[in-house]
C-alpha cells in the first residue's frame, strides 16, 4: 500500500478487450483495491478507448480515449498541482453531480517524432512505430478509430536515431509497427511512396547492417503489406536489403462480397496478384484471413476456401484469424455465430499439411466470450459509445 507515503497517487492500466474478458476476475480484484484507497484509477488503450462507458461503469475514474502521449502528461501535471484536470482533452469521466458521463473531446494528434517509440531510460525495447493512423477504416479494425484516418509518419532521422540506440544496447534486430509497411512516406496512405520507403531502408541498411552488423525486418510481423501496394520493383528492392525471408499480405477474405462489406478497399484479384508477385521475388508469403463475420454465407466460405487452396498450391501459407466483435468498431455490435463445422474441418486439414496456422480456434472462443459480456451489459454497445463521442455527454441512466 503506497497511499500512506503520498498525498496523491494514480494507478494506470492499459488493456485489450481479449485480456479484459479472459482475466475478468483479476480486473474485479483491482476494483476492490480501489474501494480501500484514495488512488485515482485511470484506464487507456484499445479496450477503454472502444468502450469508455463500460470501463467507467466498471469502476475506473478516468478513461483516456485514443492516443495519450500528450494528454496523459498534461493530466498528471494538473492532478499534482491541484489544477482542473477534468478539462484535459481526450478523456471521459462520470460527473456524479450532473449524473452524466462526459467526454472532453478528441486530443490533438501527436507528432511521432516528439516521442520515443519505446522506453529508452529503462531500456525496455519494442518494434519502432513508424506510421500511425489508417485511411481505410476497415469496419472490423480498432486502429483507425483509435488513431484516426489521417496518416502520420516518424521521420527517417528519428527512426535512425532510435534504431541506433537499440543497436548500441545489443538489440540489433530492428522491426517496425505500421498498419501498412508500404505506406511509409505517403501523404494520404492511399497511394505508395516507394521513394520514401527506399530512402528509409537504404539509410537503415547503411547504419544497422554495415555499422552494427544488425538486421532489418520490414513487412513481416508485427506489420503487414496491403496487397494493392505490392509491385515487383519495390519487392525486388526490399529483397536486396531486408533480412526477413517472409512477408505478410493482408487479404482478410476470399470473397469480394465480404471485402466490400468490411470496406477493405481491395479485391480478391488484387490480393492474388500480390501473392504471386511476392512469391516470384523470392519471399515466403503468409496471407492474413479473418473468418466468422456474422454476415458470411455458405457461398462466401466456399469462395474463401477456393482462394486459400489456390494460394497454398502456389506456396503461400495462411495466417488464420477469427473475427472478434471489438468495441468501438462499426462491427462491434454484431452478434457472433460459430464457424461452420465443415469449414473448420477444411481448415484443420490445411493445418495438417502445414499450409495454415494461427490462433483462430482460441479467437473463436474469445469472440463468443466477448459476445456474452455484451449480452450481460459489461461491455456497452458501440452505438452508445459513439453517441458519447459525438455529443460530448450522455445521461448516466441511459448508459447503464
Image: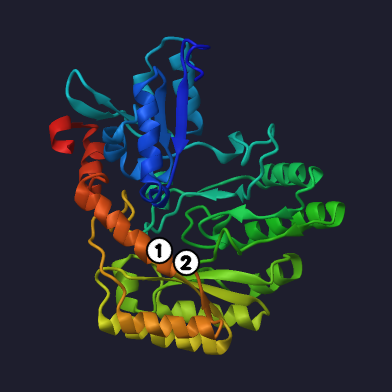
Image coordinates of residue 136 in percent, x first then y, are 40, 59
User: In the figure, 344 relative to 134: above or below?
Assistant: below
User: In the figure, 375 relative to 157: above or below?
Assistant: below
- Tell me the quarter of the picture where residue 335 sits: bottom left
User: To which residue does mark 2 refer?
Assistant: 359
Residue positioned 47% across, 18% down in the render: 9
Residue positioned 36% across, 40% down in the render: 48
Local crowd at mark 2 within 10 Å, few (<14), some, or many (≥20)? few
Image coordinates of residue 353 in percent, x first then y, are 54, 86
Image coordinates of residue 180 in percent, x first then y, are 53, 60
Q: Is residue 141 left or right of residue 80?
A: left
User: To which residue does mark 1 refer?
Assistant: 363
The residues bearing labels 2 and 1 have C-alpha atoms spaced at a distance of: 6 Å
User: Which residue is more in the foreground, 373 or 116?
Assistant: 373
User: In the figure, 391 relative to 260: above or below?
Assistant: above
Callout 2: SS: loop
User: In the figure, 213 relative to 266: above or below?
Assistant: above
Residue positioned 38% across, 39% down in the render: 27
- Tell me the quarter of the picture where residue 78 sits: top left
Residue positioned 39% across, 51% down in the render: 22
Whether residues under marks 2 and 1 lie with C-beta atoms below 8 angstroms apart, the answer is yes
Local crowd at mark 1 within 10 Å, few (<14), some, or many (≥20)? some
Res 139 seen here: no
Amino acid at each position: 500500500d503506497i497511499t500512506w507515503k503520498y498525498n496523491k497517487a494514480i494507478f494506470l492500466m492499459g488493456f485489450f478487450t481479449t485480456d479484459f474478458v479472459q482475466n475478468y476476475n483479476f480486473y474485479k480484484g483491482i476494483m476492490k483495491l480501489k474501494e480501500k484507497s484514495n488512488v485515482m484509477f485511470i484506464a487507456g488503450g484499445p479496450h477503454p478507448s472502444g468502450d469508455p462507458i463500460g470501463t467507467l461503469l466498471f469502476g475506473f475514474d478516468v478513461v483516456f480515449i485514443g492516443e495519450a502521449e500528450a494528454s496523459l502528461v498534461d493530466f498528471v501535471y494538473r492532478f499534482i498541482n491541484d489544477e482542473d484536470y477534468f478539462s484535459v482533452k481526450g478523456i471521459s469521466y462520470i460527473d456524479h453531480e450532473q449524473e452524466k458521463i462526459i467526454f472532453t473531446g478528441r486530443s490533438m494528434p501527436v507528432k511521432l517524432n516528439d516521442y520515443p517509440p519505446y522506453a529508452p531510460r529503462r531500456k525496455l525495447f519494442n518494434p519502432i512505430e513508424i506510421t500511425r493512423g489508417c485511411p481505410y477504416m476497415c469496419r472490423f479494425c480498432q486502429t483507425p478509430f483509435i488513431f484516426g484516418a489521417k496518416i502520420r509518419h516518424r521521420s527517417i532521422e528519428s527512426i535512425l536515431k532510435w534504431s541506433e540506440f537499440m543497436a548500441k544496447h545489443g538489440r540489433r534486430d530492428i522491426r517496425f509497427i505500421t498498419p501498412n509497411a508500404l505506406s511509409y512516406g505517403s501523404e494520404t496512405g492511399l497511394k505508395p511512396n516507394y521513394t520514401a520507403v527506399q530512402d528509409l531502408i537504404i539509410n537503415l541498411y547503411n547504419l544497422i547492417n554495415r555499422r552494427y552488423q544488425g538486421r532489418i525486418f520490414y513487412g513481416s510481423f508485427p506489420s503487414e503489406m496491403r496487397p494493392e501496394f505490392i509491385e515487383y520493383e519495390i519487392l525486388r528492392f526490399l529483397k536486396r536489403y531486408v533480412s526477413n525471408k517472409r512477408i505478410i499480405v493482408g487479404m482478410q477474405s476470399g470473397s469480394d462480397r465480404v471485402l466490400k462489406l468490411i470496406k477493405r478497399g481491395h479485391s480478391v484479384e488484387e490480393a492474388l496478384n500480390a501473392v504471386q508477385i511476392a512469391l516470384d521475388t523470392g519471399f515466403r508469403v503468409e496471407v492474413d484471413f479473418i473468418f466468422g463475420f456474422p454476415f458470411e454465407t455458405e457461398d462466401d466460405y466456399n469462395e474463401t476456401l477456393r482462394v486459400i487452396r489456390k494460394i497454398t498450391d502456389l506456396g503461400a501459407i495462411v495466417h488464420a484469424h477469427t473475427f472478434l466483435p471489438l468495441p468501438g468498431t462499426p462491427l462491434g455490435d454484431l452478434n457472433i455465430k460459430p464457424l461452420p463445422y465443415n469449414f473448420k474441418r477444411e481448415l484443420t486439414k490445411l493445418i495438417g499439411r502445414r499450409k495454415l496456422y494461427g490462433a483462430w480456434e482460441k479467437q473463436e472462443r474469445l469472440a463468443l466470450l466477448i459476445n456474452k459480456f455484451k449480452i450481460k451489459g459489461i461491455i456497452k454497445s458501440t452505438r452508445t459509445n459513439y453517441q458519447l463521442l459525438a455529443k460530448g455527454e450522455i445521461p448516466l441512466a441511459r448508459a447503464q
